[in-house]
Amino acid sequence: MLTSTQSNLRQATRYQPRQAVTCNDINGLEIGRVMNLSETGFMLMSNQTIEVNETLILRIDLPLNPTHQITATCEVIWGQKSSFSNEYGMGVQIKTIDDLGEIALKRYLNDTNRATAA
């Protein structure tokens, strides 16, 4: 659970996807699903735990028309065992994202048919 200090560190509003948004590693293996998402980060639920401070290159499949896959360099900021499943929850910060990915992410977050403020 985020403390009030941690929640104040968020730079952008988080949105909850209305459709499944998956997250894969650079080899295409599914890592987990995105629970909420912003321009600067997301919460990831996964069957595996990823160490805090680990940097990863991840691909996020946004359900746009056509589907758009964002590739971003990300860092795990926090992680903990879920209180409601056998999975792990992790806070992930987007460090770098390409220009087209950034445009697609903003388009996705601004479409209320796709995501709602969390």
Image: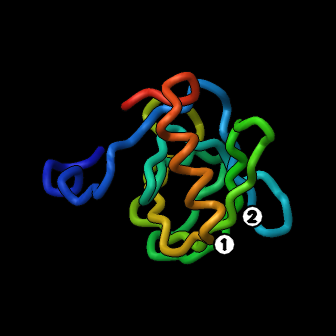
- Could you tell me if residue 14 is visible in this image? yes
Q: Is residue 116 left or right of residue 111?
A: left
Q: Which residue is drawn at 71% across and 38% down?
A: 64
Q: Which residue is drawn at 43% across and 34% down?
A: 83
The circle drawn on residue 25 is 2
Q: Residue at x 52, y 31 (%)?
A: 111
* Label 2 SS: strand
Pinpoint residue 9: horizontal percent, then vertical percent.
23, 60
Pinpoint residue 106: horizontal percent, then vertical percent.
51, 49
Q: Which of the marked residues, 2 or 1, is nearer the chain's N terminus? A: 2
Q: What residue type is labelled 2?
A: Asp
Pinpoint residue 67: horizontal percent, then vertical percent.
78, 42
- Circle 1 packing at 10 Å, graded few (<14), some (14-19), many (20+), is some
Name the outermost residue toward the left: 4
Would you identify the image quadrant in which residue 103 lies?
A: bottom right
* Label 1 SS: strand
Q: Which amino acid does label 1 sit on?
A: Ile
The circle drawn on residue 57 is 1
